[in-house]
Amino acid sequence: MATRAVSSPARTGTLGGSRREASVLRHLDVTMIAAVMAIAALGVVMIYSATQHRFEADPSFYLKRQALFVVLGIGVMALVASIDYRLFRDFAPALYVVTALTLLLVLSPVGKNSKGAQAWFQVGSFQFQPSEWAKVVLIVCVAAYAANHRGDLDGRRLLTLLVLAGFPMVLIELQPDLGTDLVFGAILLFTLLVAGARVRHMAVLGALAVTAVVAVFHFGLLKDYQRERLTAFLDPQGDVQRSAYNLNQSKLAIAHGGVTGQGLFKGTQTNLSYVPEQHTDFIFTVVGEELGLLGSGLLLALYGFVVWRMWRAAVLARDLSGTLICVGVMAMFVFQIFENVGMTMGIMPITGIPLPFMSYGGSSTLACFAAIGLVLNVHMRRYS
Amino acid sequence: MTAPVRAGDNARLRLSVLAMVVVSLFAALYARLWYLQVASNAQAQVKVTNNQVRFVHEEAPRGRILDRNGKVIVDNRVSEAITVNRAKFNNDVEHVTRLAALLGIPPGILVKRMSDPRFSPYKPVPVATDVPKDMVVYLAEHQDDFPGVEALELTERAYPQGNVAAHLLGYVGEINDRELKDRKGKGYQLGDNIGKSGVELSYESDLHGVAGLTKFEVDAQGRVLQTLDARPAQQGADVQLTLDLDIQKLVEDSLAQGLDATRHSYDKENKKDFLAPAGAAVVLDPRDGSVVAMASNPTYNPADFVNGIKPELFNAMQDPNSHFPLNNRVINGLYAPGSTFKLATALAALDSGLITPGTPFTDTGSLQVGNRLFKNAGSRAYGTISLPTAITVSSDAFFYNLGAQFWYTRSQHGDAIQATAKTLGFGERTGIPLDSEAKGRIPDPESRKKLHDANPKAFPEGRWFAGDNVNLAIGQGEMVVTPLQLAQSYATFANGGTVYQPRVAERILQQDGKVIRDVTPAPERKIDLAPTVRNAILTGLKGVVASDKGTAHGSFIGFPLSSFPVAGKTGTAQVFGKQDTALFVAFAPADNPQYVVAVVIEEGGFGGSSAAPVVRRIMEGLAGKTPGPIAVQQGVD
């Protein structure tokens, strides 16, 4: 088996004893890594398709950058997987503080405003989006807190947890980045569910969430463009010039693909840039148009496979914190996939949530690889 | 290190619930994917294509209009225009103000012109036409200051001969909604030019050409990526008219001079000068019905309609005081024919056998019919005369008698005058390919009753009396004709009985002169014209001009009748509340007719006085002489 081939002691790192590491590596989930690599590779190709006409001077500008992100991401994944997740768990408070500080910092003039959101740090020609990292950190922190209390989340602890998670969420909403907050919400929801939050509490939370959504819409807490984007999918025949136009073009691109697709790099909707933000949030439309039902169906199957491996890792984890980390990562992926793909097909509101490993972007790609690293970490240490 | 906390059974149950949630979410994505890519795929194919393709329509230059000798009467002219390409123009205050200053118009007007909805966003919008050359040069030298502004050459209608034959040619204007709807699918677009009247309208389908169509592929921003297909505009075909430009000019000049001279002559009956506000003249070739010249006065200048007529000018043309210069009186002016109608009465009388050419009649200057006394003009008595002399001197009494006799013998001959008038083409449109032709009217007992029943106020008398027949016999009463019908009836007589539908075009040509199709003469029917009948009437008509008793004799003194014999008939029609209408119809050479000339002058008095001199001047030109000045004659019918 391939697992054996890579698990030779000579290739393991310097952390811990080589014998022990070898036994850990024997349980590495190579199939999930393969699926993730396949998705990431497809993502690079699709980003190239969406951006090859952007710069005459360098058609592969985005391709090269995304490829770099993937290579870096693999490194990050390896790094995260190699450090025992229990160490992360134990240092969760520190991670939390550091992350909260960066989220505060990005709101200061040090951060950079782009497309109406104060969400980036500019370093050279690259931009870092701390809220992407915050998702991964939140997963670890929530898992750590819940596991520390052995899954016994009474009202007070639940409230503490909500406040802990709520603080970065507020900071993120100040950017504003509603999409990432929604991912936070999904992570919280899944984790609390599995961590053993009382059904009663969950019901109250649900009611509060609904009230909050209604209030947000009613009291104008949303910016006009946000409200418009969020509701465009409810009325696709609406103002075609704006959000509904984008949505219609997105759906049209996917429908245009048919069963077999228009062929790689041959999507006319794609080539003529009818779909906005196509290399980032709307990358799925490229797959839909150029590779058709077969290609996009296969992509969803790969995601399904990855999610199943996460679920399996959650079930097999040797402790509750491992289970909850896997559940958190799974929540992040499931929500991002469903929301992003659903949005391009017009069944979910338009929010700026990237499609894991597919959407162009360093922070998102690296965060996703780190998240996969966490799951690999939990999975391969299930016996140690 | 604390002991590991394993997920308990409760957590496992919750994980299973989670798995189900996730599976259903993925199922939803698959279902939607199937719906879009399989169920909606066909629709999407169509929509995507429409997304990416834009059409730009370029109007073709119209075909030219030539006279029968190939002289260009209506042409196209290239006009230097400043255009704005809205896709490239920087639509800010600075650029708008700068361009407005260059053009010398207020910025508001410029913005209005730029947003003209007739132009596609991919098509440059003309904001100034006919600009001076130095403006074009300035623009070329300062192109950086005017992004998206270009000087373009636009073609528009041009009239190298001035406003000659305006009514026959018609004018061109911007297509309206109704015309656009009527011509759906024929390549017209908002903003296109279309023939509005005259030949421009009737030969629109030949003149219009085929619009150019460029198919562009555009991206989401509407930027042109490539040209997929370009079909160049194809200029419309040329229309060669039967019109002779020189004769047309002669006819227009003669009519204008005749009107002017008539306005300076005294109407003894009404104790003032004749008003002569308007008139019509037409020259037909009796051998095939070709219109050689057609003039209506007052006239207009078709060039005023190029690029849209100024509203004040158009409104002025609708003012009754302007006597409606847009009306082509040759085809839609309705006039009582007066004595010119005696041709029809004479034909009816001879054909029916009511009289023979030699049947004598004693003209005492008037005729008693029932309790009414019908008088000759000026109550002149011509003594015992037969038909030819009756025509020459225009004896009303002679024809009153025919009208009365026809009424008394109605059971035998029916409404013979009306029937003959009908075969000559009165009461129906001639079918000349020009718009808004009037039908005219032949009154008979039935039509009288119908008119009365429909409008008792305007037509208080619903019955037909002997006196009505008497009036009809000399072209009075409710009988009305167009000058073209009048000319056509004399053409039929002149050519020996063939009724031709008048034609205005001879052929349709390509620009290189290759014939696309000929417009052949259209003989409609033949009427019986026995030589004895024709000769008797011809003798009378020749006498009108040649005999010293003839009603047009005075107008033709000094005319070379021996080399170019003219035969014709004068008419002086009474119009209630107005001065008499003067008419003269003639053909020449009398024995081998090549031209029929009909002239009508509204409120012009005697036909022999004011209409005949116009015909004489035209005939001089046709005979190859230099036409002299018009001299209005004194009182002859």
Image (cartoon, coloured by chain):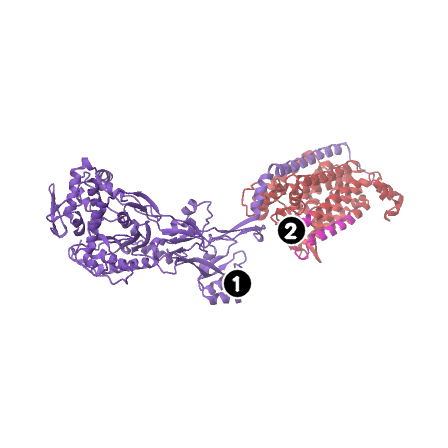
Chain colours: A red, B purple
Q: Quadrant of residue B313?
A: bottom left
Residue A101 appears in view: no
Q: Amino acid at mark 1?
A: Phe
Q: Is residue A210 left or right of residue A314?
A: left
Span highlighted in magenta in the image? A46-75
Does dot 1 land on a helix, a strand or a loop?
loop
Residue A108 appears in view: yes
Does dot 2 land on a helix, a strand or a loop?
loop
The kind of secondary structure the magenta stretch mainly shows is: helix
Q: Which residue is mark 2?
A: A175
Q: Which residue is mark 1?
A: B146
Q: Between residues A169 and B444, which one lies in front from this camera angle?
A: B444
Q: Is residue A321 left or right of residue B488?
A: right
Q: Quadrant of residue B631?
A: bottom left
- Which of the two discs, 1 and 2, sits closer to the camera? 1
Q: Amino acid at mark 2?
A: Gln
Q: Position of residue A237 (x, y in %)?
A: 54, 42
